[in-house]
Structure formats: structure tokens, C-alpha cells
Amino acid sequence: MKLELDVVFDLDFSLCCGQIFRCRKQADWWYGISEDKIFKIRQTHNCLEFEGVDTAFVKTFFGLNDNLTEITRHVNKDPYITAAINQFEGLRLVRQDPWECLISFICATYKNIAAIEQMLSKISQKFGEKRHFDGQNFWLFPSIEELAMANMPDLEECGLGYRAKYVQATAKRIHDEQINLESFKQLSYAEAKKRLFEFSGVGLKVADCVLLFSLEKMEAFPVDIWVKRILLNHYTDQLPQDLVKKLQSHNSLSNGEYEKLNTFGRNYFGAYAGYAQEYLYHYERSQK
């Protein structure tokens, strides 16, 4: 199938910016998995060509209904983010499945992108359903029940380390209490964040990532070491100087410091702070 784009979109930018972990590129095709769907997609100028999914899925999954012109205008408040927006024009937030997104970011704690991808691949191959598509084997992400019933040694074999107990406990709670993660989309940012904190392995950053990448809370502003660096290098004039001095004195990030930087990002960039964060994050990493 084909879709002629009437909006600005860049497939590569959107899938290479660290927001999603189970899409991979082969030649000029991207292969992806979302819930029970396996698909491939490529972009040639303003045309998307895809197989395995329909147009409605592509528009929703890749955020093509977001008014990116209005969003970038809203967050474009200083020279640094202007440069980020200009360099990565067309980057959009992907709409991930909340269940997979939650487990993915629990696994992502203190891991780089390559390690996260490997863990999720191993989890899927060990516990997920095998599918054949376009001459290749793929594995769906394990269901809530499959991970709730998984034993600890099998989870640890996937390279999760201490995260294995968090994954199992979270899966069990969602399964046993029949929690509908999709329903969190109807809650406010603060209330949805509070609910996510109830799950094992979910701290401030994991919650904000899940809120932004799967629960449609565009005001979420995840903060990691990269974002801390961005704010210290380019936004010190906007931050309290006592906070700046404290942040400059060490490399880590306490919960209190996280909350102050998170609040700054949400207040400064507004309702689309999450989009600002993703542009800044991808831009900063591209400079290294």
C-alpha cells in the first residue's frame, strides 16, 4: 500500500531517536512489530510504502495526525531548540502499545539503546509468539499473561539482571488485577503518573517515558543524563543558580533534581514539552 503525505514527516528521524526499540532497518525498509502486527515501511520523498498494516494504523502509529507545524511553533522558544527542529524536521512521536512500552522502559533503566534492544529481542524470542513475514521470522512481544507466568531463571536468561523481578512483579499485578493500561490515557498527566508509580521498577523517568511514548501525554518531559546536560549547557539562564551549581557538582541525578528539571521543561515548553524533549535529545546525541 502507499500513502501520499500531505504533512511533514521523516521516517528515519522518528525511528532512530531512541523512543522505540523493536524497529530495525534493512536496506531501505524498516521492519516493525506492534502488538499482533508485523509490518515493513519505507519513505521516498513524500510517499510512504508499507505492507502488513493499513493506512489508519500508519497514520496513528507514526503520529501523522499530530499538527507538527503547530507543535514545533509552540515549543520553538530559543536558538538551541530552533537548531534541533531545523535539523530533524519531520520527527514525530510514535504511538506505542502501553504494555510493551512499560516493560521496555523498565528494562531500559541504566542501559544503552543497543543493550535494551537485545534484552527485548531475547524476551520476545523466549516468551512471545513466532510469526513469519516477508521471508523472515519475527516474534510478537509477550502478552501480560506470558510474562506474569514466566519463572525468574528464564527471565534472567534474557539478560535482565535485577530488572527481572520488576518485570515479573509488574506483569503479575497487571494480570491479577486486570488493569487496563489503555484506560490511563483518559487520566490526567499527574494521575496517570501516580498510577504508573504503583508498578515495580517504575520511577520518575520510566513513568515519563511511558506517559509520553504510549499514553499520549505530550506534556511529559523525561529527564536523563543527556537532558540534564542539555539544560546545563543551554538553559542555565532559565534555571535557579543554586540548582545549576548543585547539578554541576556531580554526574548523577537525584529524584528531587529530576523533579525540578522535569517541572522546568514542562513549564518552559508547555503542552508539547515531550516533543521538545525528543528533538533536543536526538539533536544533542547527534552532536557527539
Image: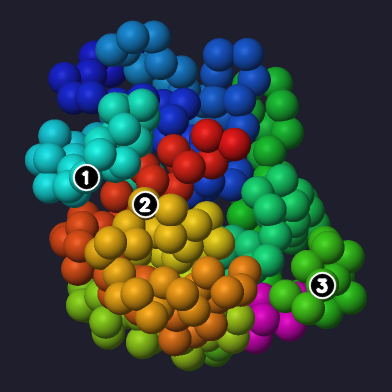
Q: Nearer the viewer, residue 164 or 204?
A: 204
Q: Is residue 56 left or right of residue 117?
A: left
Residue ID for mark 2: 234
Quadrant of the rendering where the C terminus is positioned? top right
In terms of sequence position, does the residue under pointer 3 or pointer 1 come before the other?
Answer: 1
Q: Is residue 3 above or below residue 19?
A: above
SS of the residue at dot 3? loop
Which dot, 3 or 1, sits closer to the camera?
Answer: 1
Q: Is residue 250 left or right of residue 13?
A: right
Q: Which residues are magenta?
A: 164-170
Residue ID for mark 1: 78
Per the model, the C-alpha gap separating discs 3 and 1 is 41 Å
Type of amino acid at the residue the image marks with label 2: His
In terms of sequence position, does the residue under pointer 1 or pointer 2 come before the other?
Answer: 1
Residue 213 is labelled as none
Q: Residue at x 38, y 86 (%)?
A: 195
Q: Is residue 154 above or below residue 20?
A: below
Type of amino acid at the residue the image marks with label 1: Asp
SS of the residue at dot 2? helix
Rendered location of residue 31, percent (x, y) = 57, 29
Q: Is residue 140 left or right of residue 221?
A: right
Per the model, the C-alpha gap separating discs 1 and 2 is 9 Å
In terms of sequence position, does the residue under pointer 2 or pointer 3 come before the other?
Answer: 3
Residue 161 is labelled as 3
Which dot, 2 or 3, sits closer to the camera?
Answer: 2
Is 242 magenta? The answer is: no
Q: Is residue 178 above or below residue 132?
A: below
Magenta stretch: dominant secondary structure: helix
